[in-house]
Image: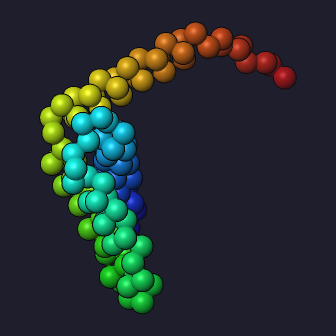
Amino acid sequence: MNRIFALWRMVAGQDLRLLWFALRHEECPGWLLPGLAGLTLFAVEPLNFALPVFGAVDEFVLVPLVLHGMVKMLPAHLLDGFARATAGRQRRRARMAAMRPRHPKSGM
């Protein structure tokens, strides 16, 4: 079960950030917003509460797979833009961490 949670966090976390970036991009594909809305409705449908076994299967297996499939269908220029944006963010974080003063440990 822990492997499923780890897979979900790894795959869905990065994919959700990429899809959020694509939604805010000026050249967002027309199918993306309706696709994500449909996937959201699928994830919170009442059938999940009526049949809990199927609800767990779709939320931990099907939803991340569909998210990843949507990412694979995105145009290459959106993927490149996301890669550049995250690389810039990582450089800024590293620069800020280097500028942060280091406090010596107190010997109390």
Looking at the figure, which quarter contains the N terminus? bottom left
Q: Residue at x 54, y 17 (%)?
A: 97
For image coordinates 31% across by 36% down, the residue present is: 25
The residue lying furthest to the bottom in this view is 50
Q: Count how many numbered circles sit on residues in the image.
A: 0
- The answer to whether 51 is drawn above or below residue 100 in the figure is below
Q: Nearer the viewer, residue 76 or 65?
A: 76
Relative to 102, is 40 above or below?
A: below
Q: Quadrant of residue 85?
A: top left
Q: Is residue 95 at all visible to an observer of this figure?
A: yes
Up the image or down, 75 lies above or below 33; here it is: above
Residue 70: percent from left, percent from top: 21, 53
Image coordinates for residue 76, horizontal then vertical, percent: 15, 35
Taking the view exactly as shown, the residue that stands out farthest to the right is 108
Q: How is the image coloured?
A: rainbow
On the image, the x and y values in percent for residue 28 come to 26, 42
Residue 51, located in which quarter of the rendered image? bottom left
Query: Which corner quadrant of the image does residue 14 belong to?
Result: top left
Residue positioned 41% across, 23% down in the render:
90
Q: Could you say which is closer to the camera, residue 8 or residue 31? A: 31
Residue 49 picture location, percent across and down: 45, 84
For image coordinates 71% across by 13% down, the residue present is: 104
The C terminus: image quadrant: top right
Whether residue 60 is visible to the viewer of this picture, yes or no, is no
The foreground one among 44 and 25 is 25
